[in-house]
Image (tube, grey):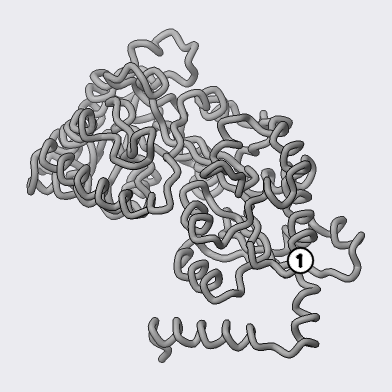
Amino acid sequence: MLRLADGFVFGLLLLFGLGCQSPANRDAADSVLRLWKASHGETAQDFEHVLAPFFSQRPALRLEAVVHPWQGWDERYATAYTGGMPPDIAYMPDEFWPRFAAAGKLAALDEMFPEEVEAMSREYPDNLWQLGSMDGHQYGIPFVYVSWHLYYNPELFDRAGLAYPPATPDAADFDAWTWDRFREVGLALSQDHDGDGVLDQWGLAWSTLDVNPNAIYPFLWQGGADLLDASRKRNGFAERGAVGFRFMRELARDGIVPEGGLHPGPFELFYDGRAGMMIAPESAIHILKRDFPDLPFGAGIVPRGPAIDFYEGRGAFGNSGFWVLSKDSPRPREAFDLLRFITSPDPSAYMMDVVQLFGARKDWQAPTDDPRLETFIRGQRYLVPYPLHPRLRLVHTIIQAEVQGMLLDRKTPEQAVAAAASAVDALVALR
């Protein structure tokens, strides 16, 4: 059996072997433009279809599209880029690409193609465009953006005699949708139906054990704290982070979230009709309609916390995905042309239909086939992106671990925040 370590060594040997190809083989390899993307539901065939017009005009080139799972992303890309055989263009979310740029593995597009990149910048909202920029250079071209808000089960709300969460900022009860009201609703939805003294229905399908902390950080932002400060040289939550930490502990202690916030798969409880709310992206609408057609659900804006900043105290997670160009691409001009083509209006619109995500371009037309999408479109104003830093994903690990320790009563919220702040400061100072 091939062990992980053996596979890693084998992969390096394979990469270095490819790096020692004969001139004829290198010429053949140079005729290929390699595209990599972790799948949001699309396949390599989708890219082959949408990119066919590009390659029909360039018969000397051919496409090699690799669409792979998100699992193992770090190992796959680290091996490829350090081994000298990265894809020509790759899709990377805003929290992924900075470490490759900082390591000198990505092309600074504004230096290589200044006129084209300047023209492209006018095709995107400024906030999304800036998420592809670091240290004064543009490394990524926006492709999608992701919007996280609330989902709720109207049947469970009706049984408890509760009003639904407001779907849009102009709803009559929008101002009253605060942390206090959210907690009241969560308590009313958390019930022991069979009378055995153990809850079998919860207010919020939520956990700190998810691979992504996208449902944790809204409570930090709504409490007035960020992950890093504006300088990106120290933490941004030492002073105000305990507000959000305390609220997460309240949700756990009150039984509003399952297993004290340490459930390994809380979304399953929502899918099973055993949780009244969950925090998830707009793409969950497609998943729910496809895989759980009998489950009733609605969408609502996240509640308002005590913060006066972070988008009116309703900070919700939002991020963007970018196409980047390898600095080691043997055909940088052709690779950039491919990147520019895939992000142009028609190809990007086609791919948004395939993956059921929101397009980053200004001219992207939001779908109108489901009114629940309006929550995620109108709620864009509350989306808080992660602060860009090459070690951001390690920051996630630190904060998640301290939240988990707090929920296990190993630390108070204040102690957990102080420990996380100290560790984050030491980490980001290494840049």
**Which amino acid, mark 1?**
Arg
Q: Label 1 belongs to which residue?
A: 331
Q: Position of residue 119 (x, y in %)?
A: 76, 36
Q: Residue 24 appears in which quarter of the rendering?
A: bottom right
- Depicted 381 relative to depicted 46: above or below: above
- Depicted 400 relative to depicted 3: above or below: above
- Determine the residue positioned at 63% across, 83% down: 19
Q: How many marks?
A: 1
- Determine the residue positioned at 22% across, 52% down: 401
Circle 1 SS class = loop
- Depicted 144 relative to depicted 100: above or below: above
390 to the left or right of 260: right
Q: Nearer the viewer, residue 278 or 360?
A: 360
Q: Position of residue 310 (x, y in %)?
A: 38, 24
Q: Position of residue 415 (x, y in %)?
A: 10, 41
Q: Nearer the viewer, residue 302 or 80?
A: 80
Q: Say whether residue 326 is visible.
A: yes
Q: Residue 309 appears in which quarter of the rendering?
A: top left
